[in-house]
Amino acid sequence: MGRTVPTYSQVLDKEVRKWREFYNALRRKDREIFDKVIELAKMNRDAGSQMRTPEPFKPMILSILLEQQKELASLRKELEKLKD
């Protein structure tokens, strides 16, 4: 039997495709940043797949925020080392 429920990765890819017009309207340098942000959203697919929601944008945004917070914490740690 075939799969009746799409995987979170498939849902995430579909959500990203909805942003195609927005993406195309961005400047080239902003497109590169957009691509990096989307990669952040994909880094927590396992957690996103556990959240049963008809709104994939919510776990997508949470994944982005989580990864950005980790990066911020890492940069703060490096900054503190440089201060010492």
Image: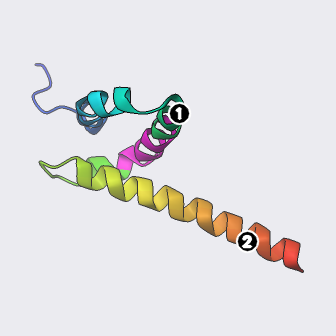
Total residue callouts: 2
**Picture quadrant where residue 74 is located:** bottom right
Occupied quadrant, residue 71:
bottom right
In the drawing, does residue 50 fall left or right of residue 37?
left
Q: What stretch is highlighted in magenta?
A: 35-46
**Residue ID at (50%, 56%):** 67
Spot occupied by residue 5 in the image (x, y as percentages of width and height): 13, 33
Q: Which residue occupies the foreground of this view, 70 or 3?
A: 70
From the image, tell me which residue sits under label 2.
77
Answer with left or right where residue 24 lies relative to residue 34.
left
Q: Earlier in the sequence, mark 1 or mark 2?
A: 1
Residue 26: give x, y in percent of width and height: 41, 33
Instruction: Tell me if 38 is positioned left or right of 49 in this view.
Output: right
**54 to 15, vertically: above or below:** below
Q: Could you tell me residue 1's position as x and y percent?
A: 10, 19
Q: Residues within 10 Å of mark 1 (few under 14, many from 20)?
A: few
Characterize the magenta stretch by its predominant secondary structure.
Answer: helix
* Magenta highlight on residue 39: yes
Question: Mark 2: which amino acid?
Answer: Lys
Q: Give the Cα separation between the discs numbered 1 and 2.
A: 26 Å
Quadrant containing the C terminus is: bottom right
Rendered view: 61 above or below 30: below
SS at badge 2: helix
Residue at image point 55% right, 34% down = 29
Q: On residue 32, which mark appears? A: 1
Q: Which amino acid does label 1 sit on?
A: Glu
